[in-house]
Structure formats: structure tokens, C-alpha cells
Image (cartoon, rainbow, N blue to C red):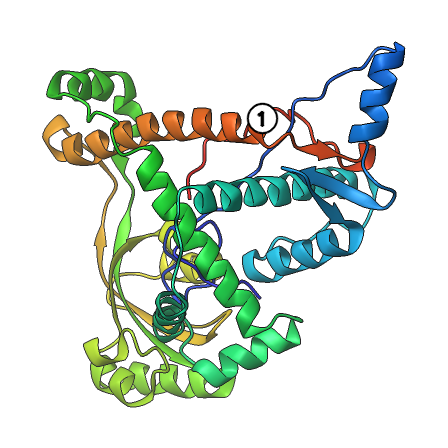
Amino acid sequence: MKIPFPRLKIRPSLVPAHPKAQVFSAALVAVALACSAAQLVVDRITALPDGAVLRVAGKVVSQQEYQQRVHLLSALYGVQAPPDGSKADEFARASAKAVAVSMTLDNAAAQKGIVIADKTASDQLTKIIQEDFPLGRDAFVQKLGQNGVSEPDVLAEVKRQLANQQLYEQVTDRVAAPTDVEVAQAYTARKAQLVRPEARHLRNIVVATEAEAVDAAQQLKSGKDFAQLAGAVSLDGKTKSAGGDLGTLSANQLQQAYAKAAFAAPSGSVFGPVQTENGWNVGQVLGIQPQKQLSLAEAKDQLKTTLLDERRLKVWNDWLGGQMKADKIAYADKYLPANPDTPDAAVRP
């Protein structure tokens, strides 16, 4: 199971899936020590204890603590360890780096006095459950238990993500927005990428079982009003009051199985049942918006936002790299990641 959080990279929204916050990676600068007596003393002082995976700002993470953290991240973000081989080794190193950078960000948030109140985190979690877990809070908690995760674990991660977001805003607060000239130059350079993909106006009904979905599809194909049926039986509290209306969405905004069915169906038709992580779905295509090359006027606002995000991201990653070095992160050899001295990718909280 993948738990939905604001701005995480992976979330199991019903349909559609929305952008999310992302898990960061971090690293250390590996220093090769020569064999002089003085350097040997440094090596003994700074070496990790037996059984340790890493150390951040003097705090040692044991193998048990590391495994607990990786299990939580896997449960919340849906990233599963490969069974064996080189991919498993790569996963272990990347996971250690993710744990390290998470600790660095925690330290930085504490230094800047960023504290997320219990109620703020609880309210945010309640909102997430209401919007993205149509079977309700009890089913949400039950699913957590099946994956060995507790609600306090989730609340702690919500706090971490909210703190990271505040941290990002503070660090990138003074980045200047691009000018109209810069936007026009970027449009010329990126025109081939500035295409609005095909999108479809969709309605959807979510039910708990395949049999219920088959029955719903049969009723709709027999002339039953979609909005009326959605209001009566759909489990998606976010859309049922609107007759199941999802709005106009591109394929990359939808879960893969649902997108495949929705974008294969002709306009006006009912499709499904389609199983997603939160139930069985029956949809309808209300209209099709074809792919289109965007003009400068059409792309300007989004392009300006993209350029500003890129600038803020550069400032963020430069700052993050400095924080990692200041925390003097160290890894056991088995967990030393590739490119240990910089963030892995241009990602933001």
C-alpha cells in the first residue's frame, strides 16, 4: 500500500492521481585517508561502530533503526526492495542515502525553529483520508496494520513533509521570478515540449467489489443516469456529490490501468470495470480534448512557473548539499551510495 501525502512522489489517489511530495536522497563527501599516524587516529575516532549503517551530525543509525525506517518508507511510498543481486545492493545504498538526507532535513528544520503542531498534522491526515481513501478511516487504519505501520508513524511522516515544505519555502523565498523576455526565450527553446496532451472529460463510480461494478456498468448501459447512480452508490466522497465528475484529465494524471481503459473508450461510452488500489471503477467519457501545440500566450503562465521552480530548485539543491557536508554524513562501506557528496536529483519537497 502507498499512503497519499501532499507533494509526495507516489500516492494511491483513487482516480485521478495528483502530484506529490517526494522522498529526497543525500550523501557525504568520501575522504580517502593516508596511513600517517595522525590520520589513523582520525580514522579510529570517526569510524562507525560495528553494526551501524550511517551517521548524521553525530547521530548513529543502527541496522535495526535503518530497517525500520526503510520499512516505513516502503509502506508509505510503495517502493519495494528488489529480491537480490546488484539491484538489491543499489537499493540498499539509495535507501541509506534517503535516510541520511531525511535526517539532515530534520536537523535543518529544528535549527530554523520549524515545528509542526500535532493538530496540524492530524487535520492534514484527516483531509488526506477524506479525499483519497473512499473506504473511510477504519479501512485506512486496517490497511496500515496489514503493512506493519501505525497511525503515529504516518502522523510523524506528515509532520516531516509539512516541515520540509516550510523549509523549502524559507530557503527559496528570495529567488527572483523570470522576466517576460526570459519566458519568451524559453518558449523558443522548449517549443517542441510545450504540447498539451490529449485529455478526456471523465465521470467515475467507485464500488467495493467487481460484482457491484459489473452491476453498475450494466445499469448505465441500460440507460441509468450516471450522475444519479454515482450519487447513490459511489464510495468516492470527493466526486459522488458532483455525479462522479472527475474533470478533464490527461492519461499521466490517472492510474495506469484506469488511463488505459479511459483513453481506449470512444466519447460518450461507459467503460470498466477497472480495478484500482481503492476499489472497482466504472467510468464514462464525456468528451475528448485532442493534443495541441501551445502558443506563447497559452504557455506563458505555466512556463513562468516552471522557470521559477527550476531556479528555486537550484538554490534548494545547492543549500541541501551544503547542509549534508556540514552534517558530516558517514556510511558503512556496504551502504556507501553513488555520488555521495550531492543530492541525487533535482527534487523538491
Looking at the image, which residue is at 83% across and 24% down? 43
At 63% from the left and 57% from the top, the residue drawn is 74
Residue depicted at 78% across the width and 39% down the height:
89
In the image, residue 232 above or below residue 120: below
The foreground one among 29 and 59 is 59
Find residue 49 and report its image quarter.
top right
Q: What amino acid type should be assigned to the residue bearing mark 1? A: Lys
Report the side of 333 relative to 133 (left or right).
right
Task: Provide residue 75's location: percent of width, then percent of height.
Answer: 61, 62
User: Under tag 1, what secondary structure?
Assistant: helix
Instruction: State which quarter of the image contains the N terminus.
Output: bottom right
Whole-percent x, y for residue 170 in the image: 32, 38
Image quarter in which the C terminus is found: top left
Of 28 and 279, the residue lying toward us: 28
Q: Is residue 139 above or below residue 21?
A: below
Regarding residue 174, the answer to whether it shows in the image is yes
Residue on which disc 1 sits: 325
Q: Position of residue 301 (x, y in %)?
A: 16, 35
Residue closer to the observer: 249 or 96: 96
Q: Is 186 placed left or right of 142 in the picture?
A: left
Q: Is residue 58 above or below residue 230?
A: above
